[in-house]
Amino acid sequence: MVVYTGNDGPVIDAQHLDAGYIPGINILNDCSLQAYPGELIGIIGPNGAGKSTLLKALFGLVNIRSGTVLLNGEDITNFKANRLVEAGVGFVPQTNNVFPSLTIEENMQMGLFLRPKKLSERLEAIYDLFPVLAQRRSQRAGGLSGGERQSVAMARALMMEPKVLLLDEPSAGLSPVRQDETFIRTRKINRTGVTVVMVEQNARRCLQICDRGYVLDQGRNSYTGTGHELADDPKVIELYLGTLAEDVENLTEHEQPA
Amino acid sequence: MPGYLRPRRALAVVAIGATAAIALAACSSSSGGSPSASTTSSASASSTTALAAVSTCSGSEDNSKTFKLGTFLPLTGSLASLGPAAVAGSGQALSDIAKAGGVNGTAPCVISTDSSDTDHPTIGQQNIKKLLADKVSAILGAESSGVTESVLKTVDAQSTVMFSPANTDDALTGASKWYFRDAPPNAVEGNALGQQIVQDGNSKVGILVFNDPYGTNLRNSIQKAVEGAGGSVVYGAQGKNQEFPSTETNFTSEVSSVIGTKPDAIVIDAFDQTAQILPALASAGWDMKKVYFVDGNLNDYTATKGVPDLTGAKGSTQGVNPSDALKAQLSAWYAKNQNGGKISAFGYAAESYDAVVIMALAAQIAGNSTPAGIQANILPVTGSTNGTSCKTYADCLALIKGGNKNIHYEGYSGIGALNAGHDPSSGYISIYQYVGKAPSKFLNSVKG
Amino acid sequence: MREPIAPRRRAHRIRLLGIALLAAAGVSLAAVAPAMAATPSPTPTPTNTVVQSATITAVPQCTVDPALGCVAGTLNDGNGNGVKGVTISMSDAGSDAASTVTNAEGHFAFKVSQNGLYTLTLKTSTLPSGVKAAVTQRKVQAVVGALRAAFFELSGSFKGSKATTSTVPTTFIGTAGQLAAQGLLLGLLLALASIGLSLIYGTTGLSNFAHAEQVTLGGFMAYSFGTVLGLPFILAALAAVVVGAASGYLQDRFIWGPLRKRGLGLTQLMVVTIGLSFAAEYVFQYFYGSQVQSVSSGVQLNTGPLNITPAAYWSMLVSIVVLVLVGLALQRTRIGRAARAVSDNRALAAASGIDVDRVIRLVWTVAMGLAALSGALYALVYGGIQWSTGVQILLLLFAAVTLGGLGTAFGALVGSIVIGLVVQLSTLFLSNNVKYATALFILILVLVFRPQGILGRKERVG
């Protein structure tokens, strides 16, 4: 685990968030989350628990009605996206996460829109991390497969060297092999020192690689612990992982997440 | 979208820009004028002869006792430039009527409303309803044939006289027993222009005509005249489907097509589009002497830079232009009663004046100024029964008071008696020739 | 007293701008005034002082009056030049007759004092050599108070008669070539406007029905700065672009930006653009009247290989250069790529740190500047600008954008040129009346077979 010097507090500290899309209806109720430097956090829970909403609230895409989000102690609640990117938060949406008519390299350039001067330096670093992208740099992203798009999306988000990377169901819609690759890559990115907060449908696999996990139910934190603690917790197994976990895992291949 | 519906200005017209009016006023006072009509001896051209405007109807007048004129003229919209002439023509007529002792001994009153244009039909509809609600004796208007057509049913249903000084659409012939006009219909103009074209030695005629009733009706009558005189229409003929859309803004292909048929002369039968057709014709090397205009585009293009020199081109227009004496009188009336306003175009001023006088005389003969009384006596006043001729309201009134109810008012417009279709049986078409970019050379005034 | 028919000119409401123009017009009309004083009156013109009892009188020129009718004509040879010195005689059913000789313009005229059927005869022997008359006798029904034309068709030409030349090609290939050039020109001008329309659609999802009014605005600005204020056209066009771009910036700053923030739906926004379009048309009419305003400084003859005017060549060149620059900017520059990124995926662009509002504002500014340029050039090559010019090409703009592929700038260019070519070339085979309908028919055909447009891409999903 990488430890940031001079800062022992959480990188992301979300306290008592209430948030929702429709006025008067909260999807998140008093939901809290902390991510410490270098951690890989997994958010799991049943459908409709508010996992993606929590992630979007952290990134200012859902209006937070009460509660605060701190980034290294600084209040970033309801910041506009471009300010969050500037502040060091990266976000990879679940779908529509590339610019289809732009080439891969142009996608990368858009990821670094705020710091155009560092383009060549960052491209080099990213292409090291994703060698396959280097080969196809002038290809349009719209023609890529789902897995490749996921790579482009992550690479784009990493261009700004974010302190925190928010991933919304990175494995959704991918074949098991590609899912594995995605998890491995996520872990790899995390090892470079980026704090990662990911939402995952594939709970069991997620908990296997996570440092810590949050189990959400109906917009509330119901369980928190290390990945292994949660994966072994009989209540979590009963309620959220279940005996059918393996089957669910196989099904995700065909699943079109909402 | 409004742009797709081009205003159907069945009359679009003769007009004079503000500056031209000033120049002409100067011209008329110095040249002394030629008194064509009898008593209008305002030769001094000073504003002293201008009469006060007749009062606005209060609404409570009884239309059988008081001659209540409702004016329905283009004060706004695409024909607004014609408004002042008609306002002044009708206003001067009412003033003259009041001065001569009124109608059946009572001074007339007026309700002035805006007809606007075919792009703003609701304005006209509302104002017609207002006039009918006020129970006017008669309505003067509209100038646009399209506007008249859109309100005539309403007027007809309320049995009120509607007298247009400017409608030229053939479709209005016999449109209603309550509808009259003293501008000659387009067919008369088409015939005169067609004869002129062939007379100039052109046997093969190309017509650039836009797809609008005004354009196609006029085209039909031009074609008839040209063919009757031994010529032929080689482009734009009836049934050839060569009309251009009235929304056209680029005429390069039309110009190529018409010149490709090798005509001797080209008639531009259109409205505003003409300003864009002319440069395209010039670019294609067409000789401007071989271009003919119609009343809808016989304009002064001096201020339009892209338009080539048109010297030698000819065109026709309906009606007469008022004499200088009448123009001076109308200008003075307008300046006095419209806060110093100026009349920039005199088209249909004489027709407006005459229309009001004809209706007032009809009311005088009837002994009351109800619509029915006026309606029954309009045709005889215009000469349909060969009555005793008289030239001013005062003279005609004296005849009527003397017991002669069969009179024939011969006014400024020079029209023949209205026929069964309530159209002038004859009217004047004037042919002008361009000098530079202005149709300033008068060639012929033809009775059609 | 007859007077010139003068302009059907609405009072110029651009008071400040109009003063100079009016003064100029005043001067030119004052010069014409003396000539008008001398124009003849409609009352009987004393052309002939000799009192004639005969019905028919030969006169050099015939002016109709209520008591006299005219029978007149002009002899032209095959080249359209007047044939002089030809004897024409006219007789009535009785013994009355008169004869005259055509003047230098080939004109002859008789006046008659009675209605009736008259016979005109052309004396063949007086025709110059080389000129032949198909018919030498013609009957004309003359009417008092009216002019009746008498026409004799002549063929051949006399010595010294020059054929008039026109630059209009007469062969099919020549015509097709010229029409193709005209189509390309129209296409390029449409492209200048439609690229902006496409960019706005791409970045905001908005179908801007007021876009055509920006074209009109450009034309009127070129008129105001050029014709009214007297700047050379190039400067006037530049000024028009600046005003257009400024209007785009201000629109987004005060209308579209705030409305986007409030989350107004696209349908509502589209209705706003329609309202804006109406409002703009009335504003144009208020300031510029309803007639065509010219921006060109004079008449130019068609010339060169494409047989179009020099102004048209320049307009094509300017359009091509500007379009290439816009294309390069979109492909190569960071901000251009950002505009494409916003087009592709607005949410992701924001998540990447792109200030989407700033990009959209820039797109509005550039798009309106381009539309203004299109309008200025349109007014230049098509003889002027009018309040309704823009709205008349609105459908073509939307057709071009849809045809090329919604939201793709390059597609808008291709779509515009296809539309331009189809509009013009269709007149080779079909009536001018249906040329726009033909273009829209092509649009339907293309969309049936390629719903995403010519250059639109089918995106891979998942």
Image (spheres, coloured by chain):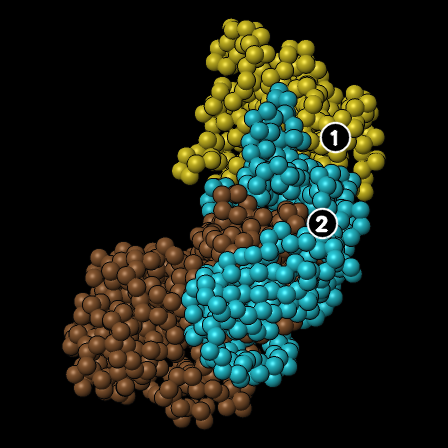
Chain colours: A yellow, B brown, C cyan
The residue marked by circle 2 belongs to what chain?
C
Give the x, y percent position of residue B386: 26, 74
Residue at (63% x, 65% y) in the render: C87
Q: Is residue C328 left or right of residue C374?
A: right
Q: Is residue B36 left or right of residue B30?
A: left
Q: How far is disc 2 from disc 1 in space, using C-alphas?
A: 49 Å
Identify residue for label 1: A103
Q: Quadrant of residue C396?
A: top right
Depth order, front residue of B130/C461: B130
Label 1 resides on the chain identified as A
The quadrant of the rendering that contains the C terminus of chain B is bottom left
SS label for mark 2: loop
User: Which mark is nearer the camera, 2 or 1?
Assistant: 2
Across and down, in percent, residue A108 comes to 75, 33
Residue in front for this viewpoint, A86 or C93: C93
* Above or below, B404 relative to B273: below
Q: Residue at x 26, y 80 (%)?
A: B388
Q: Is residue A256 above or below residue C22?
A: above
Asked whether the residues under marks 2 and 1 belong to the same chain, the reply is: no
- Residue drawn 63% across the image and 25% down it: C458
| C-beta proximity under 8 Å, tags 2 and 1 | no
| Dot 1: element | loop
Which residue is at a point 72% across and 68% down the rendered structure image? C231
Amino acid type at mark 1: Thr
Number of the label disc, if any, that sits on residue C305: none
**In this view of the protein, can residue C294 be seen by the observer?**
no
Q: Residues within 10 Å of mark 1 (few under 14, many from 20)?
A: some
The amino acid at mark 2 is Val
Q: Position of residue B184 (x, y in %)?
A: 39, 65
> What residue is pinned by disc 2?
C168
